[in-house]
Image (cartoon, rainbow, N blue to C red):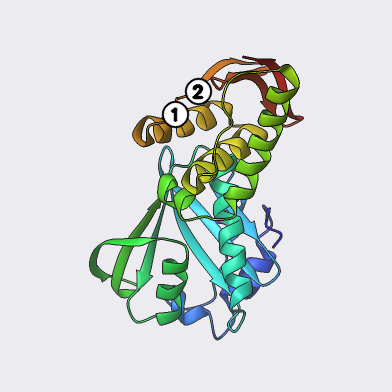
Amino acid sequence: MTIRRTFDASSLNEVANDPAVRPTLGGEGDLDLSDLVSDPTNFALVGEHGGFVLTPLSPGNLEVHSMFKPGRGSATIAAMRSAMEWVFTRTDCVAIWSKVPKSNKAAKGFARAGSLRALFERNHELLGATEFCEVPIMRWAMNNPSLETHGERFHSLLETAKREAGSNLPEHPHDAAHERAVGASLLMFERGQPGKGAAFYSLWARFAGYQPITLLSVAPVAVDVGDAILGLGQEGMEVLQCR
């Protein structure tokens, strides 16, 4: 599923004002999202059948507003997962927040598929009885099996370099949670967020019993991962030194 950022509200306005969608957004009358979408502090992400607008609540915390044409099912879920990966790996976001009307069963299922959990409930002036939900970055990563592919990509390159260098350090056994943490961190490095990537992985590692990593420099990016020193960034991954 391809998700892209936009500053043009035309496609989202079309979806938001669809007769099947407009009542779920609260209020009355036609919606014009132009000011919201064109604001550079927000993130408007669109796909084929709709999209999302994420607005900052505080540094690192974004509230998401979703709007999709009905009946898209799995395509909508795929778009949500792509958007979450986009936001968590390309920005400083560490948590996504959302208001989910209790009467909207589709929205509740959508939230559960994205690992959002209700923090509290209250009546909202536009949405009625509403669940106020959140997904932190760590839960997103640990519930995201697609990240394992990126973790395995990282470990394949590292273990090959160690063998070629004659390293005596043991190879890492497959560990699904570890692969997901590594995969999420790797995507952050590759998408211009080296500080976030190092901090995210090191937090997970300390809690899980693995060795944290050290960001040695950001220009160019160099990282000490224990077994080796790596160059990590938008140009790819390079083993600079094996131990």
N-terminal of the two: label 2 or label 1? 1
| Residue 193 higher or lower than 75, as above or below | above
Could you tell me which secondary element the residue under label 2 belongs to?
loop
Marker disc for residue 202: 1
Residue 86 pos. (x, y %): 60, 49
Q: Residue at x 65, y 36 (%)?
A: 154
Label 1 neighbourhood size at 10 Å, few (<14), some (14-19), many (20+)? many
For the residue marked with disc 1, what is the amino acid?
A: Ser
Question: Cα distance, mark 2 to mark 1?
Answer: 6 Å
Q: Nearer the viewer, residue 124 or 63?
A: 63
Residue 243 pos. (x, y %): 62, 14
Could you tell me which secondary element the residue under label 1 belongs to?
helix
| Residue 177 higher or lower than 75, as above or below | above
Residue 187 pos. (x, y %): 62, 39
Q: Quadrant of residue 68?
A: bottom right
Q: Quadrant of residue 219?
A: top right
| Residue 62 higher or lower than 210, as above or below | below
Q: Could you tell me which quadrant the N terminus lies in?
A: bottom right
Using the rendered image of the protein, determine whether residue 41 is visible from the camera's viewpoint: no
For the residue marked with disc 2, what is the amino acid?
A: Ile
Q: Residue at x 61, y 36 (%)?
A: 186
Residue 212 pos. (x, y %): 45, 25
Please say if the residues under marks 2 and 1 sit with CB atoms less than 8 Å apart.
Answer: yes
Q: Which residue is mark 2?
A: 213
Using the rendered image of the protein, determine whether residue 164 is visible from the camera's viewpoint: yes
Report whether 99 appears left or right of 214: left
Q: Nearer the viewer, residue 104 or 124?
A: 104
